[in-house]
């Protein structure tokens, strides 16, 4: 499992929250330091708002967040996209000019935000200059344009040093740019008219750049100039209007339930005859199991986990639903006829009334799904202690739990792979391996009786390759099929370290086959009602695809800290 | 109630004048004019007019249609949007007597319809039927406001259902009596949800409403938080010492908490009421941050305080000191 610290998870949540409030867009989320709106990454941000700067020492994170939030609030994304020019530089200039506009119209009530975005813009320009961004001619030209537009729209001066750097270029452009700038200022509050002027400026600049290339006399100086023009700005061009509308359509189709089910059906299994689904403890000799259990118990006792405190905090997480019940044998209220005889039997103390009362009830069900792939083997003791303690805490808070695991029975594809080889290696055979689904504890077993089962996690032999997509669907369906209240909160927590890894299947079907299936399974989970999928320790490659994540610290030896952090993280995740 | 009669006999008290929408409610100039019956005399049950209250034109016109044409009007909106106050203020300008009933989970059928009570008559104990709030107000010129309509118990709601039909008569089974509603009886309701129950976890204790119930409300008006400019007027009217710039910042902060609440990031929000309290606290303590802490911050959960502090920084460009302690 890979480290994702609690502080980092919390910080991303907090950053996300402030952006949601400022922009009024409720579906924003920061996942693994990327901005997501309804499962789509928003990347085409002005260079000074690059999300990587959130952790940079020179930057003002508040300015980055506020800048993006203001942009979402005051700018029509579709309109901006439909006007956006095609060239790389042109689209960049157009984007930055629009960003400067929204930052300049920040309402006076948000005085702090205004200050934050100004600080960030100036800090970015200084950083750009000190990194040699203005050594190239294009860099200097762009910086001059941006700073001049910024000064004009905000009516604020720049730091002296910066003024000196851009002064010569600015003066050279003044006659051509001047009238446009006046128009920009006039149309500050009207995105459509502003965009027209901004486009004129982009054309002007792009002509300037073209002429600069043409005027170069010799190849040698040309080469020198090319290296000079190298632009030190990280810029991802927004999708062009036509492709974006197509993409939008695609994504809406992709998101649809039917499409998802269809693509899930396309996943094939070459031969499922060797797949197993068994209770893990049954595959271990009782004597060996006792040793594992002893080892696990000793480990848990060593930790001094504050059970009572943790139980209380977990109880609060699961929606304590108020239910109306009659409280009987009260001294006042409505007469309960079942107790009428008490008038005769205890005339002095007729407690025969009832009144409706609200009762708190914990309603929730949790499945812990553990990736038993080879790379998880080293951390199995820590995972087992965490799982054992979590199950104990949850069951004491009256939340039913199940602990499942997945791996393969053999390495290198096993019997299905050999069969496929023998049958002539038809292309795209589907999954080629002996899938193994382990049940460490089911919902009906009480945690005290389930401890040998959980101790089976310590057996090194169960750790092999992993087929994640199938396992997620298997666990999710088990969690759903358990009868019960519809409003029951269901949470599936996946402990895993990375992508699905089954060499035989990947060789036969391509690199993305298993990963795509996992992503589809994740998307399927997100569409279920009262259902949440959580990832814990997920590697960087897949992290952005999990809307809910629990922190995991590989170095830390103390699971009680993790358990406390998880309680906070689970609590802070609200339905979005 | 029946035992404590108001100074004016509401049984025979009828609207005695007609006022025009545009003249009495200048806020509603954007809508077609119509005549509304009104009372020239004030009775005990008429709420006080609050001159600083800003009426929302759309909601007002819906409420006034209810008064003029005997329509059943339901106001729906988040808490703190001033739904009940809005109804009262419209009634106050018409001098229409008002009665508010909070339909919380504990109100029973007997409270509403009436029950037999034991009284002393000529030194003897006799049982007597005491009318509940509904038969009592049905016979009088009263605008009955059912607050928290979606929190009412299902069996109680069916008692109300009978009244929701226009000229709907109420049969008192206990007394073999049919009550004709007073021509000037009106009924209004306010609710947080539109009968969909507590679907997003925001409003605990609300119920799903029977669709037959929802169907009987002729007009459902949504009332939202005031526009910042309107809210500023109220705030400055209540706390005139505030500078307009500060008022703007306070309102921007309130709006951030509202958005945060909508997104599920914080569990408390600042209503106009909280804003005014904050302003009043500032008048007492001469300290904006302390006033804010006492009026709002201390209502928040400790996990939410850092986020609220960020909101504060966004609006006032200073750090909230209280949070660091």
Image (spheres, rainbow, N blue to C red):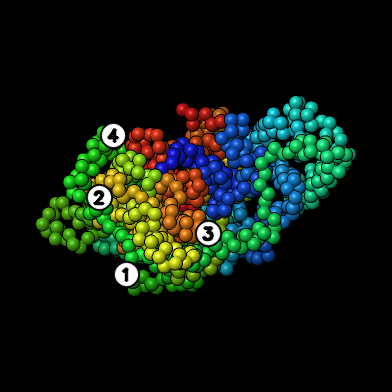
C-beta proximity under 8 Å, tags 4 and 2: no
For the residues labelled 3 and 2, the Cα–Cα distance comes to 56 Å
Instruction: Indicate the quadrant where residue A388 lies.
Output: top left
- What's the distance in space between the residues labelled 4 and 1, CA to CA? 68 Å
Q: Name the residue carrying label 4.
A: A303
Q: As rendered, which of B105 and A192 lies closer to the eye?
A: A192
* Chain ID of residue with mark 4: A
Instruction: Determine which residue is flagged by label 3.
Output: B75
Chain of the residue on which disc 3 is drawn: B
Viewer-proximal residue, A338 or B25? A338
Q: Residue at x 39, y 57 (%)?
A: A413
Viewer-closest of A316 and A301: A301
Which mark is on residue B174? 1
- Residue B305: x percent and y percent? 48, 37
SS category of the residue bearing label 4: loop
- For disc 2, the marked residue is A453
Residues under labels 1 and 2: Cα distance?
64 Å
Q: Are marks 4 and 2 on the same chain?
A: yes
Pick the front one: B200 or A59: A59
Camera-side mark, 1 or 3: 3
Label 3 vs label 4, nearer the camera = 4
């Amino acid at each position: 499992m890979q480290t994702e610290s609690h502080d980092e998870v919390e910080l991303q949540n907090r950053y996300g929250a402030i952006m949601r409030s400022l922009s009024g867009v409720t579906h924003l989320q920061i996942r693994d330091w990327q901005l997501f709106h309804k499962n789509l990454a928003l990347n085409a941000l002005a260079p000074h708002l690059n999300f990587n700067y959130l952790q940079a020492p020179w930057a003002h994170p508040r300015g980055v967040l506020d800048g993006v939030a203001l942009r979402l609030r005051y700018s029509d994304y579709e309109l901006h996209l439909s006007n956006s020019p095609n060239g790389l530089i042109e689209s960049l200039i157009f984007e930055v000019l629009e960003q400067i506009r929204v930052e300049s119209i920040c309402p006076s009530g948000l005085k702090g935000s205004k200050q934050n975005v100004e600080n960030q813009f100036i800090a970015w320009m200084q950083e750009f200059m000190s990194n040699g961004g203005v050594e190239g001619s294009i860099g200097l030209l762009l910086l001059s344009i941006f700073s001049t537009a910024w000064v004009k729209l905000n009516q604020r001066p720049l730091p002296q040093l910066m003024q000196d750097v851009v002064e010569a270029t600015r003066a050279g452009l003044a006659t051509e740019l001047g009238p446009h700038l006046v128009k920009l200022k006039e149309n500050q509050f009207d995105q459509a008219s502003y965009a027209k002027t901004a486009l004129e400026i982009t054309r002007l600049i792009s002509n300037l750049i073209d002429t600069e290339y043409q005027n170069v006399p010799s190849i040698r100086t040309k080469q020198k100039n090319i290296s000079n023009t190298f632009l030190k700005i990280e810029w991802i061009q927004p999708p062009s209007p036509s492709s974006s509308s197509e993409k939008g359509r695609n994504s809406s189709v992709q998101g649809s339930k039917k499409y998802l089910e269809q693509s899930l059906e396309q996943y094939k299994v070459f031969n499922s005859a060797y797949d197993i689904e068994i209770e893990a403890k049954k595959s271990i000799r009782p004597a060996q199991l006792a040793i594992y259990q002893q080892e696990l118990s000793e480990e848990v006792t060593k930790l001094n986990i504050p059970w009572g405190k943790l139980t209380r905090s977990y109880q609060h997480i699961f929606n304590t639903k108020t239910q109306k019940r009659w409280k009987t044998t009260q001294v006042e209220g409505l007469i309960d006829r079942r107790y009428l005889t008490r008038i005769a039997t205890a005339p002095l103390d007729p407690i025969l009334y009832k009144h409706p009362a609200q009762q708190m009830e914990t309603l929730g069900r949790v499945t812990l799904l553990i990736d038993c792939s080879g790379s998880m083997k080293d951390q199995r003791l820590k995972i087992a202690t965490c799982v054992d303690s979590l199950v104990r805490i949850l069951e004491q808070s009256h939340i039913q739990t199940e602990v499942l695991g997945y791996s393969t029975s053999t390495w290198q594809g096993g019997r299905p792979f050999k069969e496929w080889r023998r049958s002539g290696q038809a292309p795209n055979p589907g999954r080629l391996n002996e899938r193994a689904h382990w049940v460490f504890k089911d919902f009906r077993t009480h945690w005290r009786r389930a401890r040998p089962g959980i101790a089976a996690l310590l057996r090194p032999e169960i750790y092999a390759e992993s087929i994640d997509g199938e396992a997620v669907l298997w666990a999710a369906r088990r969690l759903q099929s358990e009868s019960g209240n519809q409003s029951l909160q269901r949470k599936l927590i996946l402990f895993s370290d990375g992508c699905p890894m089954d060499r035989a299947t990947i060789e036969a079907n391509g690199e993305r086959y298993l990963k795509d299936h996992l992503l589809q399974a994740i998307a399927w989970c997100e569409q279920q009602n009262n259902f949440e999928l959580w990832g814990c320790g997920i590697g960087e490659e897949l992290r952005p695809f999990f809307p809910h994540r629990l922190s995991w610290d590989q170095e830390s030896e103390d699971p009680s800290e993790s358990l406390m952090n998880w309680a906070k993280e689970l609590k802070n995740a609200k339905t979005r | 109630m029946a035992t404590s009669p108001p100074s004016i006999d509401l049984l025979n008290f009828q609207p005695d004048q007609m006022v025009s929408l545009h003249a009495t409610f200048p806020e509603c100039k954007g809508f077609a004019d119509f005549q509304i019956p009104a009372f020239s005399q004030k009775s005990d049950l008429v709420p006080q007019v609050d001159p600083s209250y800003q009426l929302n034109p759309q909601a007002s016109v819906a409420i006034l249609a209810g008064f003029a044409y005997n329509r059943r009007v339901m106001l729906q909106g988040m808490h703190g949007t001033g739904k009940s106050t809005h109804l009262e203020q419209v009634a106050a300008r018409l001098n229409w007597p008002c009665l508010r009933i909070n339909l919380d989970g504990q109100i029973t059928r007997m409270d509403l319809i009436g029950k037999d009570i034991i009284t002393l008559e000529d030194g003897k104990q006799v049982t007597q039927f005491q009318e509940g709030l509904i038969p009592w107000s049905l016979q009088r010129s009263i605008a009955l406001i059912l607050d928290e309509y979606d929190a009412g118990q299902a069996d109680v709601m069916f008692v109300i259902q009978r009244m929701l039909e226009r000229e709907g008569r109420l049969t008192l089974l206990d007394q073999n009596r049919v009550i004709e509603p007073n021509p000037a009886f009106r009924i209004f309701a306010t609710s947080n949800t539109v009968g969909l129950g507590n679907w997003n976890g925001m409003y605990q204790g609300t119920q799903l409403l029977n669709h037959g119930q929802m169907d009987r409300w002729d007009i459902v008006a949504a009332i939202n938080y005031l526009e910042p400019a309107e809210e500023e007027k109220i705030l400055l009217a209540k706390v005139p010492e505030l500078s307009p710039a500060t008022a703007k910042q306070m309102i921007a902060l309130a709006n951030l908490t509202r958005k945060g609440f909508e997104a599920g990031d914080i569990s408390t929000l600042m209503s106009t009421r909280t804003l005014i309290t904050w302003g009043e606290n500032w008048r007492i303590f001469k300290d904006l941050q302390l006033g804010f802490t006492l009026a709002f911050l201390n209502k928040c959960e400790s996990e939410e305080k850092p986020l609220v502090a960020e909101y504060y920084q966004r609006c006032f460009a200073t750090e909230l000191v209280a949070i660091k302690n």
